[in-house]
Amino acid sequence: MRAKWFAVVTLMCFQVGCAARQGSTYSDLFIPDGEAIYERPLEEVWPEVRQFFTENKLPFKEDKGSLVLETDWRQEFGGSKISSFWHRYMVLGKRETPTKSKLWIIRITKSSSTALSPPGREIDWGPSRVVGGRLGHGDRVEDVNAGSGSVSSDPMLSVEDWEARIAAPRGENSFYAGSGQGSRDLVMEWRVFRSIAPKLMKEENAPKPVQVATTPSANPGAEAMAFECGLPILGLGKQVKPGGTLLLGEMHGTQEVPRFVAQASCQVAVAGMPVTVGLELPLESQTRVGAFLESAGVEEDWLKLMEAPFWRSPYPDGRSSEAVANMLEQLRQLRSRGLDVDVFVFDHPTMQGQARENAMAATVRHHVESGPQRFHIVLSGNIHSRTKKGLPWDKSFRPMGLVLKDELDSVVALDMAYNSGSAWICAVDRNGAKDRLDCGIREAKGRDNGDRFFVHTWGGTNDDGYHGVFYVGAVNAAAPAVHKGLGRPGAGDNSLSPLEEAEPQVASVR
């Protein structure tokens, strides 16, 4: 059964000759719109596929009889100690004709979070021709270990049947496998193609493999395959350019937004563009944040970062969440491995109203103008990032985004879009107490637009001044970092500092 990933098969110009014409403009930030077709039989292509993964230090297991291989798990962001996401590739060789072939590369994402595991979707990911388990004992499935790479001896689904399953994807070509998400990775398919296709051509004018650019300050050995940045974010590449500023307006207190920022930063930096992340943290935190980025990330470094009063606020509004702290660690990991990634903070919490917006805008503008060759990702609450004047309670209000739009050459503002879930939110006290916030886990209602992270712009702005949205899928609440102690978030050992609270507080319902 033929795959139905693309409705129009005329995109088969994506063969060796067509790929050569695209070589000069290729970037891993752009999602290819067609399949890579090899003008060689699959049996000639497969040895080069094996060599590619060997040379790029991606160990794999192989089922030689069916031309399928599966790589070992890799953690996101260079093996961060706190990363809860792992990835592996499953590569399937496919015959188009007796003389043409292609690869399907499925990126499998696994998380320690059970929130990513809808019940009833346990699928085995083994490298053999079968997917599933052995039936017995009253039709009970045995020997199924979703995401572990183990396989059972008796088939339930052949590769051909599996092709039909993958051809009916959920969301953006996605489906779940246990606690992981499996998605076809076209960027990786073309990455492999551009590396091995020239070796397969007999002509002397064969196109050369495209090398990923590195920044002047980057480690010369830092290549794309050395980093695990997660599944490519759809639409991100269209926004990335030197001097560009991408304003992300978020709902504070989710796990997903900090991960989106870390993944976006990783993907931009790996593609060769220096990237700076701006965070709505108090300005006095800049020294600690900068020192942490340059540190080894040991327990003592975490203590120095988190000794600021900001992390222990009695009203943690989501900006001081464990997810934000973990994002700083992930960005530190990227920087420590040679990628040109930087971070600055820009909040002026002692100011109020318009004065605060002006001060935040001035800080952001200073960093953008100081790095005209860098791409800036600026994360803030979704009121600050608007580029239109006025709020329902203040018609003269000029948000930070509007001030920046008037002062910088390239500003794109995106509102957060998400599927339903939960978030750690601080709201006005429900008992009506003055000067008091009620903080905790609350329901967040959104709209389901699939499982893939993506960026989408409209070609104009809406009533709030947003040019589009960045979508993060279903959201899960991120508790304040202090709930994990003042050491490394996620450590769980509570070795140096006592927990202020054993468990996150759930917002009361009155």
Image (tube, rainbow, N blue to C red):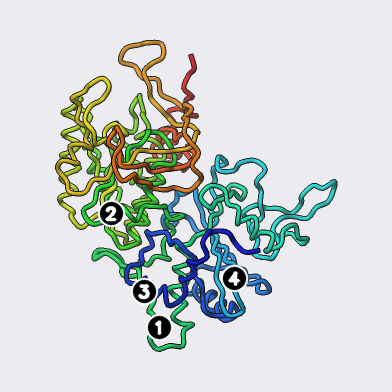
In the rendered image, residue 394, in percent from the top left (x then y), is placed at: 22, 21
Q: Is residue 114 left or right of residue 19?
A: right
Q: Quadrant of the N terminus?
A: bottom right
Closest to the observer, 347 or 368:
368
In the rendered image, residue 328, in percent from the top left (x then y), is placed at: 35, 46
Look at the numbered discs 1 and 3 and tell me whether their residues touch, using CB distance below 8 Å.
no
- Dot 1 alpha-carbon crowd within 10 angstroms: few under 14, some 14 to 19, many 20 or more: some
Q: Which residue is mark 3?
A: 21
Q: Residue at x 38, y 86 (%)?
A: 205
Q: Which residue is mark 4?
A: 93
* Residue 136 visible (yes or no): yes
Nearer mark to the viewer, of 1 and 2: 1
Q: Residue at x 41, y 14 (%)?
A: 430
| In this view, 50 is above or below 463 | below
Considering only order in the chain, which callout, 1 or 4, is on the residue closer to the N terminus?
Answer: 4
Look at the numbered discs 1 and 2 and tell me whether their residues touch, using CB distance below 8 Å.
no
Report helix, strand or loop for mark 4: strand
Considering only order in the chain, which callout, 4 or 2, is on the residue closer to the N terminus?
Answer: 4
Nearer mark to the viewer, of 3 and 4: 3
Q: In the image, what residue type sits under mark 1?
A: Ala
Q: Which mark is residue 206?
A: 1
In the rendered image, residue 97, in percent from the top left (x then y), is placed at: 60, 76
In the rendered image, residue 242, in percent from the top left (x then y), is placed at: 23, 57
Considering only order in the chain, which callout, 4 or 3, is on the residue closer to the N terminus?
Answer: 3
Closest to the observer, 72 or 245:
245
Report helix, strand or loop for mark 1: loop
Considering only order in the chain, which callout, 3 or 1, is on the residue closer to the N terminus?
Answer: 3
Label 2 to label 4: alpha-carbon separation: 36 Å
Q: Is residue 63 left or right of residue 348?
A: right
Closest to the observer, 445 or 54:
445
